[in-house]
């Protein structure tokens, strides 16, 4: 249905506006919309969301990297960065971000090939000024010389961060194989070389200004503002952009500067993405074409061909790509969407089912890789097994056979295709009508981009097939597209270390190098005899009689009616503002477990969420000779492989459920065996019970080919864990290995994984199910009655208990859970490691402060001291974020990633002690930098923290109140999705139910925390800041990881270490150290408690066995220097 809110009160004010068609929206969408166009051409959509506590805005400019001049790659992206650094009305570079930070806000931006989108969110009561500051980006940005010179470092750092991402690397190589004259091949990110501000600052700034004048025009701009304000009020707020005039940019034939001419020429390289500029039938301008240029250096041999990439992560990717015409102008009848469904299907008769059965693939997806306004590239992307790698030509053959089957059906018997089309229409309409809105921060940018593409009327419904039927089936287009899915119109990507090793030394290949990342890849011809087989001439490589079109979907909801137990007033529509009632404990059986239930009365949707956690220590522990559970690497490895095998085994049978909006997962993790389901409530009990039965009552999924695939994936991930990740990921790993891990490290996991056999996985499955020390926590919420919930719990409990060979002994069971180790106050740990990723230029510095006071759990479970501590640390984490970013990222330009945040862990006791779960509060600062070595970055962080304390001490209480009001308001923001609400409530059940039962579960802990935050005073912040960060009381871990730009320097480490610092340089010695750290419990640590630990370390000479060798560190050493601790 469409709705339009144009009250008479604003008729005069809106007289000069053009009223645009209102969006078609679903029944579950409680928002109202007012789309208008200003006289200057700006398209505006105002959104009234009565449930929102914040206001968000987004602006999409219909320009992106496709319009970059070739001589200044990354100019569109650079313009996006520069717009944040002040305007004529608000000239301070940090004015905008500082204002948002004070009022619970956040912001971001992104640049794609055809669009640049900016967005922000802020507390609703402070939105008007924030919106005015935001709109000035487009009216009158400054683009100062100093900002231009500095911000290019941020762009360069962002590009450096991308160098270790396989997805980015694969994209750049794919672009290299496209027509070099096509706009799609432009290097979108940019770097310090393509934007040479050091040597040509004036030229780059002139180009920035010219690019902004040329493209940041009112008619190129779409703005969305969404919040709880009335539409009339929001309309008043957008007046600044009404004053935006069309910049004076020379027309064709006029005199132009060098920068203007360059920008003008590039502006004609690509078509506009905006709907109003799109013809009904776009001219076909394909980027991926045979022999893309007449140059002799063209990398493409005759089609089909394949190219091979050596990835950083251990993967075996086979990607088949077909260049196709554009589809963006037909979102509801896209033949690519139909092909995506038919080729990407995983049910019976699908290519996935056949290839998985033959142990050739573990995953398959199909869809558009690139969707431009004038071309598209369709891909079938597969993850191969080791056997599939050996038979990759046969895998391609199966895909091409299915392509021919689709083509034959379209040509000779389209009835089955039409039936499937009608089924897709029905499901699409259900999803549209029952989809509740996202938060305004997610809504605004998606809506602004969609309006630019599809116009205001279809911005919510494009692609939802609301007006489609059997009569509108796009048979002609489908036949055309299907006819292009042939070997002659195909390029294949092989992204695999194994494939690379086999081909890198061959002579009959073409070795290439990508321009921007410097990546090597190899282009190869395909044997004509194989191509002939791929055509089915005279017969295909693989006999595949099982291939067929999808069967009717048996999981489509039979009813969308709401539960009869629901009061009539709750059936009328969503009531997001209604307080959430706590779940009811319907069953508390000491032999089976607990059933918690909540009938949803807030969303009025036919959906539910179900979680069953079977607490089972045998998942990752074994009992020792004394009958005490101990952490076991082999058990943990078997758990991961077992759950992966089960998912693979169930993929074909449950794929239709996923298509019909029913999602499931089963994991064997630290707490036990967890089964989760979400989606439409109608068939959920049947699906969930099937998942549990097939795991507990059957061993049919324990097949060799599932084991081989799961084991192979795990080994590849483990073996390339360090080589394929960024330095900041390494920093997290080393820190957590010290503070929260019980594992023996990746090498131990690899060793145990290699030992896994069919016999061992079968034995593990039996031990897991036979463990009689288990207890289930079941939470069923949503559109489900108590009777249905009880019946499911009884049925599932019967399945679980029947798998055991003996009676339950829950009274004596140990509850497995996460741990955190306590860093004793007055102790600093410095971790120093080299990145094992050979492509990593950046170093990482992660500073973590652990609170000595346990975190707040709830009024009945925690002390007032814990409440005040958590409140203060949360406020400090909010206040520090923006000044840290401004100093280290904007002014010092240390790197693209400069962040600080509040982190939360949970700790529980080891076996033999009564269960508890205590929160642990952390303040974390993280920097990824190529500019300075990690030790120097740590020094810069320390310097900043000194000045920050001074700022904190001098901060007016009125300013602090702004932060506390914003934070408390955000904490009390109501859930808008059932899944989020259910996850929050089950988290409390999971952590606290074994300790306190049902009577004292802290359902409303967030209300108490928000109240305490509102009353935080400056002296509270200073006091807790000193406790958290002063050398005498802090519990700090600094994780340093060194990249290739600044390698690990042993002498620098020694000279920078203080007498209060414990320096650790190897995983073995982290293990030795953590064995001496206590588990974090519910008691407060005393200041200077770390002195005894340090004395013990100094006296324990056998610990200091490390030696510094070359640029690396072997073992670990403790330095006692006279240098004063910061």
Image: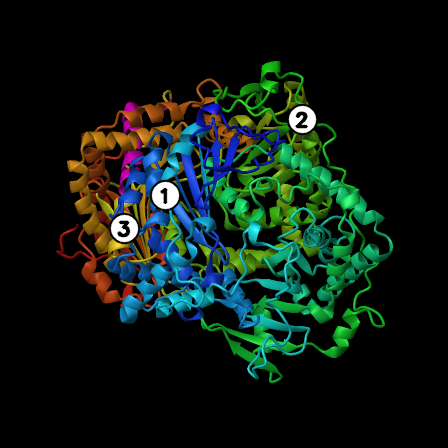
Residue 312 placement (x, y as % from top left): 49, 65
The disc at residue 792 is: 2
Query: Residue 234's quadrant in the figure?
Result: top left
Q: Give the answer, above or below, for where 300 lies relative to 1061.
A: below
Q: Is residue 292 visible?
A: yes
User: Left or right: 936 with respect to 900?
Assistant: left
Q: Assign the N terminus to one quadrant of the image.
A: top right
Q: Extreme right residue here?
A: 412
Q: Secondary structure at mark 1?
A: loop
| Location of residue 280 (image quadrant) | bottom right
Work out whether mark 3 precedes mark 2 in sequence or the reverse, and give the earlier one: 2
Label 1 close to label 2 by CB (< 8 Å): no
Q: Which residue in the protein does label 3 denote?
A: 829
In the rendered structure, which segment of residues is drawn in magenta? 861-881
Question: How many angstroms separate mark 3 from mark 1 (CA)?
Answer: 56 Å
Closer to us: 966 or 536: 966
- The x and y percentages for residue 61 are 45, 51
């Amino acid at each position: 249905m469409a709705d339009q809110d144009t009250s008479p009160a604003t008729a005069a004010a809106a007289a000069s506006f053009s009223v645009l068609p209102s969006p078609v929206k679903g029944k579950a969408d409680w928002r109202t919309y007012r789309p208008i166009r200003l006289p200057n051409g700006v398209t505006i959509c105002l959104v009234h969301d009565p449930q929102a506590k914040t206001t968000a805005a987004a602006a999409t400019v219909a320009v992106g990297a496709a319009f970059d001049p070739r001589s200044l790659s990354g100019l569109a992206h650079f313009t996006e960065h520069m717009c944040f650094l002040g305007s004529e009305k608000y000239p301070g570079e940090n004015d905008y971000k500082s204002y948002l930070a004070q009022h619970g806000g956040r912001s971001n931006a992104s640049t794609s090939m055809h669009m640049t989108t900016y967005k922000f969110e802020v507390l609703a009561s402070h939105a008007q000024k924030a919106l005015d500051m935001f709109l000035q980006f487009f009216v009158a940005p400054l683009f100062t010389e100093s900002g231009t010179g500095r911000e290019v470092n941020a762009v360069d750092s962002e590009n450096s961060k991308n160098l270790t991402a396989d997805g980015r690397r694969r994209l750049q190589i794919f672009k290299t194989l496209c027509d070099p004259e096509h706009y799609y091949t432009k290097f979108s990110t940019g770097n310090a070389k393509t934007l040479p501000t050091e040597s040509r600052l004036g030229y780059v700034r002139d180009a920035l200004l010219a690019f902004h004048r040329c493209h940041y025009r009112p008619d190129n701009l779409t703005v969305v503002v969404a919040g709880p304000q009335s539409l009339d009020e929001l309309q008043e707020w957008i007046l600044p952009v009404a004053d935006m005039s069309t910049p004076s940019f020379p027309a064709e034939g006029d005199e132009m500067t060098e920068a203007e001419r360059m920008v003008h020429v590039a502006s004609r390289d690509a078509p506009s993405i905006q709907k109003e500029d799109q013809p009904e039938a776009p001219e076909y301008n394909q980027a991926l074409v045979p022999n893309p240029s007449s140059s002799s250096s063209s990398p493409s041999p005759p089609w089909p061909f394949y190219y091979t990439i050596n990835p950083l992560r251990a993967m075996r990717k086979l990607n088949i790509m077909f260049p196709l015409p554009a589809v963006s102008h037909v979102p509801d009848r896209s033949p690519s969407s139909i092909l995506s469904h038919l080729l990407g299907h995983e049910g019976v008769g699908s290519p996935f089912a056949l290839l998985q059965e033959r142990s050739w693939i573990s995953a398959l997806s199909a869809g558009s890789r690139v969707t431009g306004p004038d071309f598209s590239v369709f891909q079938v992307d597969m993850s191969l097994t080791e056997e599939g790698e050996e038979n990759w030509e046969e895998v391609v053959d199966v895909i091409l056979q299915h392509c021919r089957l689709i083509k034959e059906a379209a040509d000779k018997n389209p009835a089955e295709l039409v039936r499937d089309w009608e089924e897709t229409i029905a499901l699409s309409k259900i999803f549209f009508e029952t989809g509740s809105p996202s938060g305004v921060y997610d809504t605004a940018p998606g809506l602004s981009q969609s309006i630019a593409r599809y116009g205001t009327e279809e911005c919510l419904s494009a692609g939802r097939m609301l007006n489609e039927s059997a009569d509108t089936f796009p048979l002609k287009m489908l036949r055309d597209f299907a006819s292009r899915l042939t070997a002659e119109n195909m390029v294949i990507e092989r992204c695999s270390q194994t494939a690379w090793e086999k081909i890198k030394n061959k002579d009959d290949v073409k070795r290439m190098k990508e321009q921007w990342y410097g990546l090597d890849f190899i282009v190869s011809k395909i044997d004509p005899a194989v191509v002939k087989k791929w055509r089915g001439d005279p017969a295909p490589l693989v006999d595949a009689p099982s291939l067929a079109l999808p069967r009717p979907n048996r999981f489509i909801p039979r009813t969308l009616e709401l539960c009869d137990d629901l009061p009539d007033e709750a059936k009328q529509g969503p009531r997001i503002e209604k307080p959430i009632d706590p779940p009811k404990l319907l069953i508390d059986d000491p032999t089976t477990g607990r059933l918690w239930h909540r009938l949803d009365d807030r969303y009025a949707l036919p959906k539910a969420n179900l979680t069953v956690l079977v607490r089972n220590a045998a998942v990752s522990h074994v009992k020792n000779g004394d009958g005490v559970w101990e952490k076991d690497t082999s058990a943990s490895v078997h758990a991961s492989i077992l759950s992966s095998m089960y998912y693979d085994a169930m993929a074909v049978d449950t794929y239709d459920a996923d298509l019909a909006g029913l999602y499931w997962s089963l994991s064997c993790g630290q707490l036990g065996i967890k089964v989760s389901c979400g989606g439409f409530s109608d068939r959920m009990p049947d699906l969930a019970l099937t998942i549990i039965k097939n795991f507990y009552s059957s061993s049919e999924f324990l097949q060799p080919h599932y084991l081989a695939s799961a084991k192979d994936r795990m080994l590849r991930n483990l073996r390339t864990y360090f080589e394929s990740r960024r330095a900041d990921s390494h920093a997290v790993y080393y820190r957590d290995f010290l503070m929260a891990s019980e594992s023996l490290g990746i090498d131990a996991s690899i060793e145990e994984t290699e030992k896994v056999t069919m016999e061992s996985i079968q034995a593990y499955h039996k031990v897991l199910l036979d463990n009689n020390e288990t207890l289930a926590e079941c939470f069923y919420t949503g559109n489900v009655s108590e009777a249905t919930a009880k019946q499911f719990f009884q049925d599932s409990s019967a399945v679980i208990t029947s798998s055991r060979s003996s009676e339950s002994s829950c009274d004596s069971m140990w509850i497995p859970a996460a741990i955190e180790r306590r860093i004793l106050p007055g102790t600093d740990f410095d971790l120093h490691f080299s990145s094992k990723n050979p492509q990593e230029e950046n170093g990482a510095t992660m500073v973590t402060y652990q609170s000595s006071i346990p975190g707040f759990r709830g009024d009945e479970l925690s002390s007032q001291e814990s409440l005040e501590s958590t409140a203060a640390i949360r406020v400090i984490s909010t206040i520090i974020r923006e000044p840290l970013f401004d100093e280290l990222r904007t002014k010092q330009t240390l790197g693209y990633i400069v962040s600080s945040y509040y982190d939360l862990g949970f700790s529980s006791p080891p076996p033999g002690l009564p269960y508890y779960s205590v929160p642990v509060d952390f303040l974390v600062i993280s920097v990824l930098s190529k500019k300075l070595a990690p030790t120097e970055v740590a020094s810069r962080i320390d310097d900043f923290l000194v000045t920050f304390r001074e700022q904190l001490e001098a901060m007016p209480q009125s300013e602090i109140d702004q932060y506390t009001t914003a934070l408390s308001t955000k904490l009390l923001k109501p859930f808008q999705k059932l899944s989020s609400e259910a996850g929050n409530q089950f988290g409390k059940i999971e952590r606290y139910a074994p300790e306190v039962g049902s009577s004292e579960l802290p359902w409303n802990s967030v209300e108490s925390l928000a109240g305490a935050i509102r009353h935080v005073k400056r002296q509270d912040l200073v006091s807790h800041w000193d406790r958290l960060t002063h050398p005498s009381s802090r519990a700090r871990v600094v994780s340093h990881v060194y990249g290739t730009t600044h390698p690990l320097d042993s002498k620098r480490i020694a000279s920078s270490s203080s007498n209060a610092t414990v320096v650790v340089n190897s995983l073995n010695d982290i293990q030795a150290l953590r064995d001496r750290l206590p588990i974090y419990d519910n008691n407060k640590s005393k200041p200077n408690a770390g002195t005894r630990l340090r004395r013990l370390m100094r006296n324990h000479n056998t610990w200091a066995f490390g030696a510094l060798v070359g640029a690396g560190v072997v073992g670990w050493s403790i330095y006692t220097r006279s240098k004063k601790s910061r």
